[in-house]
Image: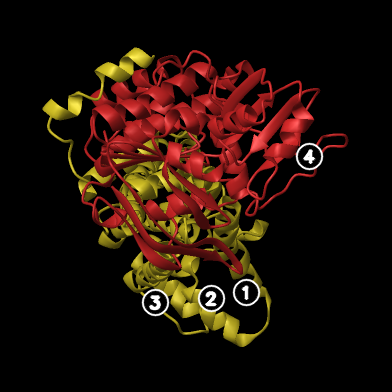
Amino acid sequence: MIEAHDLTKRYGTKLAVDGISFTVQPGRVTGFLGPNGAGKSTTMRMIMGLDRPTRGTVTVNGRPYAEHRSPLTEVGALLEAKAVHTGRSARNHLRAIAATHGIGDKRVNEVISMTGLDTVAKRRVGGFSLGMGQRLGIAAALVGDPQTLILDEPVNGLDPEGVLWVRNLVKYLAASEGRTVFLSSHLMSEMAVTADHLIVIGRGKIIADGPVDTVISQATKATVRVRSPQASDLAARLAGPAITVTPGEEGLLEVHGATAAEVGEIAARSAIVLHELTPLTGSLEDAYMSLTSESVEYHSAALPGEPSRSTGAHAAVPDPAAAAPTTGEDAR
Amino acid sequence: MSTAVATEPHRHATAPKPGKLTFAHLLRGEWIKFWSVRSTAWTMSIFFLAIVGLVLLFTLAVLNTPSPEDGGPPAGTPLSPLDAYTPAVYLGQFALAVLGALTITGEYTTGMIRSSLTAAPKRLAVLWSKAVVLGVVTLVAAAAAVGIAAALQALFFGGQDMAVDLSEDSTLRALFGTALYLATISLLSFAFGALLRHSAAAVATILGLLLVLPIVFSLVPWKPLQYILPFMPGAAGQQITMTDAAIEAQNTASTVGADLTAWQGYGVLVAWVVIVLVIAAVLLKRRDA
């Protein structure tokens, strides 16, 4: 369990983390989601005692990380930047880390094969690809067989197989082993299929903290897609203070703020024929965009000719495009 | 690969938890780190080559000292086999200084330090364990290099009265002091590395202190500098590499009157190491890694 209270970090005049409090519970995967520069890495570095909080406290399993007598068996961490001497082989890197806790070569060999590094373990880390570096970082985090795992952007640079492997690993450790897993990412699609619980951070402040489904439903309004030959008639009858209607192509409407049942009843009362009535649920991506739109540190300029982002949601029936990054994922 | 996930983590339920973080374990970790980078082998090789090779080379030079008529030193200046060690140490020390600095700056430039500090989050133990491993290894290596040099010197030049005579007790102290000086210089460089967290900055600083500043100080005709000179790490530390007779001759020639004995001089060098290391330790504890 990780507990942060009023955690604050200031670099010069810049407030990187602004008085955040949260709890990461064991037995589930907690996602730490936020745009670049939101304070995810800084928070994780403070948990690991690498950065000193300007104010506030953070404890792991009841005490500050540095106070544990066997830190690596309590917490394993993969932090964002590579933390490996480039001139050393992967195996020696792991051996040196393990030796500090009296962990033998047997466990080192175990994590090497777990992370799929067998063929490169004797090579110097300097020549590693981003993906191999990530695997080595995960191996180092696992070498102490820790109760708590903190992973900063673990799937960065991994191939699809590696992404799937990390996803299954963290789910297994949390659900079956009851360990605490705290995982940061800026990839919403990854979080949607990996995390059970979400903490969303933007500009150093927590903007949402709850189960994944709750965070999504709270941040996105109900949307219904309606197709009718009498679309303009229907739009007129639906329009109201709480409901907005966006006309689409011929005969198509997107209704925000009303459920499918409400739309259907209004249509029936007015004897309007419907060809389609589809409730749309918001995706995590939409929730994320609506939550963080105020707090993105680095906005990208819209590309010329790009339509402005609609509040559009994805169909509850997964459309192939949205599901593409998670193809092959059937664990849920 | 995902099948491995299912089989592995059950291990912790049955197997006892691995050992705790102790200083002995940290030393073991630092020992592995020390020998698993190429720079260690490189600097060590250069160091042995420099000490052994240069001692033999300079012994040859001492033997071929020109006579007073050809511009050599005045007759009666005693030739000592130890004279060959001074220039060898002067150059060989830089190999160990680079090794000492890289031991810690290599971790900062690569980011390894974050792994080290995660494993030992109280931080200071990382510094001490590194210093112990570096100090012990460099002392053993320097003693071996000096011993090999003395043995080869006796083998090749013993017949020409250029073998070190260990029966004079200050000679043995001077030889051991040479090894001690070299190891301590390596630690001083390590301390600057810990303070500056940058390889080039640390090496430049130690070069400046050992090489450049003494020359500048002796060239600038400003009296106070002459008083500082004997307390610079190189000049002070090298007292212990000299025989008592040589120290006395040097002190007689000196107009400054600092007159440090062998162990006083070494004490000054140790004080340099301690001061820089303590500042580095305070900053290590305070700074973000």
Dot label at residue B229: 2
Q: Is mark 3 on a helix, strand or loop?
A: loop
Q: What element carries label 4?
A: loop
Residue B249, position in %: x, y? Answer: 44, 73
- As drawn, the chain in yellow is B
Q: What residue type is labelled 2?
A: Leu
Q: In which quarter of the image is the C terminus of chain A?
A: top left
Can residue B239 be seen here? The reply is no
Give the amino acid type for the residue marked by disc 4 in the picture: Ser
Q: Mark 2 lies on which chain?
A: B
Q: Reply above or below: A284 against A290.
A: above
Residue A225 tag number: none
Determine crowd level at label 4: few under 14, some 14-19, many 20+ residues with C-alpha closer than 10 A. Answer: few
Q: In this view, does A186 lie above or below B274?
A: above
* Spatial separation of the CA atoms under disc 1 and disc 3: 18 Å
Q: Give the labeled residue for mark 1.
A: B218
Which chain is displayed in red in the rendered image? A
In the shown orientation, is residue B181 left or right of residue A249?
left
Q: Name the residue under label 3.
A: B260
N-term mark: 1 or 3: 1
The residues tagged by marks 4 and 1 sit, at their Cα atoms, a distance apart of 73 Å
Under tag 1, what secondary structure? helix
Measure the C-alpha gap from mark 4 to mark 2. 72 Å
Q: Do labels 1 and 3 share a chain?
A: yes
Residue type of the residue flagged with mark 3: Leu
Circle 1 residues within 10 Å: few <14, some 14–19, many ≥20 = few
In the drawing, what numbered circle is on residue A308?
4
- Tell me whether circle 1 and circle 2 mark residues in contact (CB < 8 Å): yes
